[in-house]
Image (cartoon, helix red, strand yellow):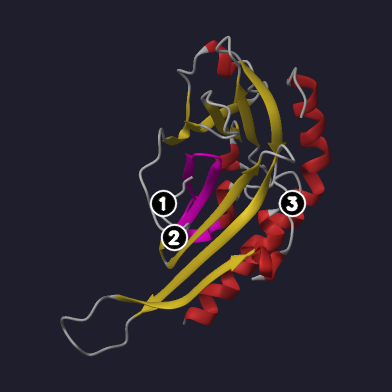
């Protein structure tokens, strides 16, 4: 049963990747025309894959429309923010923000629309600078298959940020990808990946849990090497799992 779910998930991701390859050039051009500037979730101690309360977190797949002008100006025409998370991303003492965007109408364009992630660095005058953009760091709306939208949210804390995905219906899995800021290199690098999947419990015990842990993986730089946020591709990472 679980093998079948994994196969279905990989097939869904493969279809998303194919659509991404067909449309990514067009989308990058559109975004570059619209954006003026250039291109943590960290729990306590060393467990960087368990949940913790973020500094700020707002996720709304229908779109967040009440953003202040110093943030909304970075959103290209035809896109809407679905997540706004703030915290100290580059350890300079100013509040920074990550925006996750969706293309308007993505719900009706199965597997075709990428979701840009923007890293906005706070300035001393309360404005923001667009420091990084990655179009393939968040799964698409349809990538969860029958389980629905797999994107859960972003968490930021003290130079770390995590992108969280998960499905809890039909399929049952959680995926948390954490990046860490390097002050010397002035960039964010993939720090840790955590993945868990569950299967239905076949126990005959009436008091048994409905689901039991099936797969639990944690990977670090020893496993995946050096990957910057610019080069990170969640579709490729899912294929390599």
Badge 2: how crowded within 10 Å, few (<14), some, or many (20+)? Answer: few
Reading the image, the residue beneath label 2 is 47
Q: Are marks 2 and 1 in contact (CB under 8 Å)?
A: yes
Between disc 1 and disc 3, the foreground one is 1
User: Residue 43 shows which numbered tag?
Assistant: 1
Residue 76 location in percent, x, y? 67, 23
Residue 150 appears in the figure: no
Magenta span dominant secondary structure: strand
Q: Along the line of sight, which residue is nearer the eye, 48 or 93?
A: 93
Tell me if residue 75 is in the magenta stretch.
no
Reading the image, the residue beneath label 3 is 19
Q: Along the line of sight, which residue is nearer the eye, 3 or 198?
A: 198
Q: What residue is shown at x 42% (from left), y 67% (from top)?
A: 170
Q: What residue is shown at x 16% (from left), y 81% (from top)?
A: 207
Residue 199 higher or lower than 144, as above or below = below
Between disc 3 and disc 2, the foreground one is 2
Report the magenta residues as a range.
144-166
Badge 1: how crowded within 10 Å, few (<14), some, or many (20+)? Answer: some
User: Residue 120 shows which numbered tag?
Assistant: none
Image-based side of 240 in relation to 174, left or right = right
Residue 139 location in percent, x, y? 60, 50
How far is the residue under mark 1 from the one under mark 3?
A: 35 Å
């Amino acid at each position: 049963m679980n093998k079948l779910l994994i196969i279905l998930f990989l097939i869904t991701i493969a279809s998303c990747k194919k659509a991404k390859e067909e449309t990514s050039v067009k989308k990058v051009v559109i975004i570059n025309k619209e954006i003026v500037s250039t291109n943590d979730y960290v729990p306590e101690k060393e467990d960087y894959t368990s949940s913790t309360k973020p500094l700020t977190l707002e996720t709304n797949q229908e779109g967040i429309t009440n953003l202040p002008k110093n943030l909304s100006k970075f959103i290209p025409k035809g896109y809407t923010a679905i997540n706004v998370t703030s915290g100290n991303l580059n350890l300079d003492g100013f509040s920074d923000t990550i925006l996750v965007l969706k293309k308007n109408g993505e719900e009706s364009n199965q597997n075709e629309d990428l979701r840009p992630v923007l890293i906005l660095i706070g300035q001393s005058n309360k404005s923001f600078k667009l420091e990084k953009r990655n179009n393939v760091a968040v799964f698409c709306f349809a990538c969860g298959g029958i389980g629905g939208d797999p994107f859960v949210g972003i968490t930021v804390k003290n130079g770390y940020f995590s992108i969280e995905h998960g499905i809890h219906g039909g399929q049952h899995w959680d995926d948390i990808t954490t990046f860490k800021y390097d002050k010397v290199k002035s960039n964010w690098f993939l720090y840790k990946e955590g993945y868990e999947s569950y299967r239905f419990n076949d126990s005959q015990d009436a008091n048994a849990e409905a689901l039991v842990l099936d797969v639990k993986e944690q990977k670090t730089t020893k496993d995946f090497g050096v990957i910057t946020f610019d080069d990170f591709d969640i579709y490729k990472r899912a294929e390599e799992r």
